[in-house]
Image (cartoon, grey):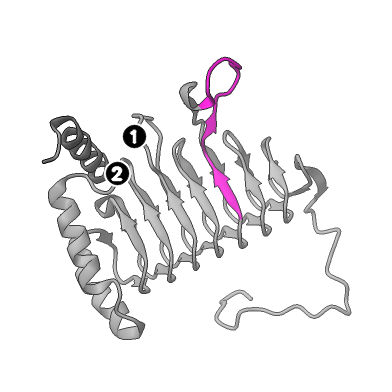
Amino acid sequence: MVAPAKRSSVLKSLQLYLNRQASSPGRYLLEQGVMGLAGWVPGLVGIALRGVLYRLILRMDGLAAIESRVRLRFAGNIRLGHGVYLDQGVYLHACPRGIEIGPRTIVMHGAVLHVYNFRNMPHSGIRIGADSLIGEYSVIRGQGGVEIGDRVYTSPFTQIIAVNHVFDDPNRPFIHQGITAQGIVIEDDVWLGAGAIITDGVRVGKGAVVAAGAVVTHDVPPHTVVGGVPARPLRTIDGTHPVPRDVPVYFDPTEVNG
């Protein structure tokens, strides 16, 4: 027989697990049932099936394309705009205040959007505007709140981390000293290079460019290129550094104002 103390420990662990997966046991069963039924189906058939069935577990404005093996937690707190695309292997964890992805935004393979607020932080959530792109294996942590504007591109392996550990007391483990979560704002038309890291409390201004591998610890002015560790201004985007004439420039043929 299982000892009462061990049984109680197992039940507490099970309850903790369920609390981290969905808003209630009933929601957990619904979300897991729908994803178990339709989440694995490949190709266009699977996209069409999820376009219908996933409306039972999340909010979808118009049509959104969700590939197979997309992992969703707290799906009732997820809202997808018309034309959103979630690639294979994407993980959205949308506990309180949730995740909103704007129209025609693409979230590429392996990206992680993770709110994970179980400390009653008031501003947690992730909001992404229209026509943006979250690159392969990018990580967005939204405990302090992340606001991303329109036409923002994150290259592969970028990190946007709106949370920080307190570690000032040498006599206590850092996991017992709490966290801070000030939030991050990335305005419209920003490009984040591959491997760039945006730390908590930062605002990246409209039209800025963050170089590959940069670690941004302070606000970035609009239309400014920054790079380095920690990132510093490299130049202003003011029209005085055009592409050399011998370098071809290509445009998306679907753009109206290419």
Quadrant holding the C terminus: bottom right
Q: Which residue is mark 1?
A: 118
Is 242 situated left or right of 218 in this image? Answer: right
Q: Which residue is mark 2?
A: 20
Is 251 situated left or right of 248 in this image? Answer: left
Tell which of 253 and 198 is nearer to you: 198
Instruction: Report the Cα–Cα distance between label 1 and label 2.
Output: 8 Å
Find the residue positioned furthest to the front: 1
Tell which of 9 and 46 is nearer to you: 9
Measured as percent of width and height from the top left, residue 138 is found at 55, 57
Q: Are marks 1 and 2 in contact (CB under 8 Å)?
A: yes
Q: Is residue 240 magenta?
A: no
Tell which of 207 and 142 is nearer to you: 142
The local secondary structure at tag 1 comes to loop
Whether 175 is drawn above or below 253: the answer is above
Query: In the rendered structure, which segment of residues is drawn in magenta?
Result: 158-174
